[in-house]
Amino acid sequence: MMRKTMITKSLLLVSLLYFGFTFSANAFERVIVGKDTLMLFAYPIEVDSVLSAKVHERLSGAYSTGCRRGYRGVWRLENDTLFLEKIVDYYSLSRPGEKEVLVDTDGIFDAYKRGGRIAALWFSGKFKVFGGKCITEQGLGFVGRYEREWTYEVERGRVVSRQACENSLKKADCSIENGMSLVASLFNGDRFPELADKCLFFEADVIPKENGSIDSLNIRVTVVDKDSTGYKYTDRWKWIKNDFSNPYIQELKTCMELIPGWDYLVVDGQVQPVRTWDIMTAWEGKGCKAHYEVVDFVSQSRRDMLTWNDTTYFLDYFPFQYDMNLYARLRPLLKNDFSPSCSRGYTACWEIREGRLYLQSLHHGKNDSIIPLNVVFPENEGAPVEATWYTGKLLLPLGGRLEGYYPPSDFSPRVVYNEEIFCDIREGKIVGKTVYHNSVRKGDSEFFAWGRRKTIDFDWDKFPELKGKKSHCSYFVQPKADGSIDSIRILLRVDESGREYGKNTIRITDLDHPYVVIFREALSRVKWDVANVRGKIEPVEGSIADHRRESGLRIKECVLQNFKVEESYVLGMLCVKPKNFDQIVKSLNGKMVRGLPYKKQLGVFRPWEAFRQLENEIINRCIPFEVREVIRQGQATENKYLWPSFHVYLLIDQTGKIHSACFTMTDNVYSALTENLFQVMYDALMQEEPLSIARFLDFSESTGGDWVNQPIGYGVIEFTVGK
């Protein structure tokens, strides 16, 4: 299926006080109104730079992406006046089980005290107060909304106006977010021969009726050359808006009418339009709808099956949709079949015999019932149909996905299988076949960890000009077959803030530059992973950050006897796991999925209180106090650009039995722990009785691809310690 390209618009945030979208609710201020504690969408202290600076001076200094300002204000609306009740250091709120730590306000707000209370007399402006449940989030296609909202206007701390509204959300069978992606995937560009090598983008507003059908539409489209699709070209695009005589807009309108129903939001009695906040890609040239992509609305789509020489394969391509005119004949029958598990609304069975590709059958996506082939091919009487319309490749995977393969962020394949057969097809005839035996040979992970620490521990004070600055090294390595380096590219960023892209960042790419040489020499001694994928060795990329400590924590060599250390797939993290960990994975079914907390009634993957309670129980039983104390102290004193982090990953089956465990952490945590602590944690976890955590998970929903609709016996569960 075609990859959905989304070009995000730039949003100008015009006010510090009020934004029209939702982020982490934990970051909101709180306001007490009567007996209710509600969320306040405003930051009155930040309006006054002097007050803000004084408050920040008294914070712990710990850093959290959930609340960048570092604190939460608690306010009270009483007698039409806004009062500041207290300020809580956000660090204490981010740690389960800890008591909240209050910020001392003495000497900061003395000028605003009235009767011993702090009145927000410095503050004037509008803000929103939220109550009830959050009924929409940003990803649904419209602004975040809560069941009850109040808009206040305040002048020098006094309320001068107040408006209240009640909101509700009507859920349809197909959610808004998926609906717009589905519209894009349904678009039939083959109706228009002139689009064979063009791209078509669209934006749309849909105003639904109460039954979820469409009341009115706003649509605009543009057609551009494939070499003019980048961000830098968007201001040159010529758009056609709401011309419903335009055939492209007519086709989009037809696709929107196929959506079984739209979610709609009612704000203060008014139905709100459903918008594509991003520019959507409806067409990318001939054959664009015939490819499967793991990142999209179609990422969980059930795949077609193909039989060849008595072997059945799951296809990563959709040959039927190579000619979207054929699919268009089928679309009217599929209106009730579209779903996240089958976004196309159908599945197909194929066969290769006598060197030709045949369509055997079509099936409804909802219940697998057969769709007569004569719906698409009127003269067909039930016999297989030769796929003469299809020209391209077919990937036939064997042996499951390639373990240990992490594609670089270029155009390398995202999904690779242990063995792959690529068939070249021209007008339904097999004209070529290539077989790949893919493999990954792991490099010396412990030596890589040594090389990484070598650069961090280097005496950077030898370069006086780097005093007070931070560095961030991004590397791109092309390994040889033996794991040594064939070539290397390095981008070193140096900045006072420690950020990768600061205003004053210096970017260095010269491999002979004295700073770069330190990284180059350390990385050149590493034996790298060698991923032989589809006939070539894949490059390896990653980064090393210079996190010099202010807290006194020191990196030390830690030679682990029963564990091995690897760089985690999360950049900047180390993974400590038993030396037999990979063998344990292979001894299971080899198809590990990420087990995520799944709340059935919400239909979403999201941790909730019951899951968190069990998580904390396991942490308290199995994670020694010394580990939690290292993290606690580090979070209280550590440089804010290296937030100490420690995660536990459990290999667990559906009965709750733990088969193995590994640990990932920032290097400052790793350097402070001993092997004995790793062994203690591992033994404690292995001695646990089967965990009731399995009841929180739905393994079948975790991942798409060849795992969909197959029994999954094992999964990975992640626990976060100290956050």
Image (tube, rainbow, N blue to C red):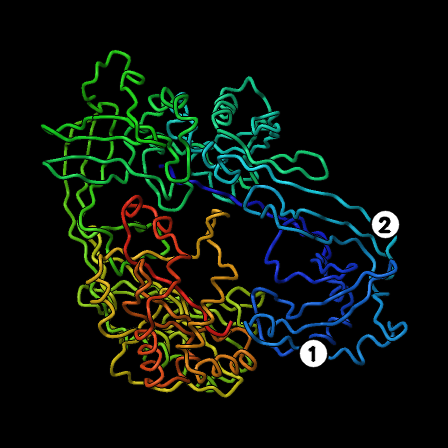
Where residue 632 appears, x then y in whole percent?
Answer: 52, 80
Q: Total of numbered circles in the picture? A: 2
> Which of pointers 2 and 1 lies earlier in the amino acid sequence?
1
Q: Nearer the viewer, mark 2 or mark 1?
A: 2
Residue 305: image tag: none
384 w.r.t. 114: above or below: above
Residue plotted at (60% across, 74% down): 92
Near mark 1 (Cα within 10 A), the count class, few <14, some 14-19 or many ≥20, is: few
Residue type (three-letter) at the residue carrying disc 1: Glu
Q: Secondary structure at mark 1?
A: helix
Residue plotted at (36% across, 86% down): 674
Name the image quarter holding the N terminus. Answer: top left
Residue plotted at (63% across, 38% down): 265
287 w.r.t. 64: above or below: above
Residue 57: image tag: 1
Q: Residue furthest top?
A: 379
Residue type (three-letter) at the residue carrying disc 2: Ser
Residue plotted at (85% across, 72% down): 117
Q: Residue furthest right?
A: 115
Near mark 2 (Cα within 10 A), the count class, few <14, some 14-19 or many ≥20, is: few
Where residue 242 appears, x then y in whole percent?
Answer: 60, 24
Where residue 642 appears, x then y in whole percent?
Answer: 50, 74
Residue 161: image tag: 2
88 w.r.t. 154: above or below: below
Between the C-alphas of marks 2 and 1, the distance is 34 Å
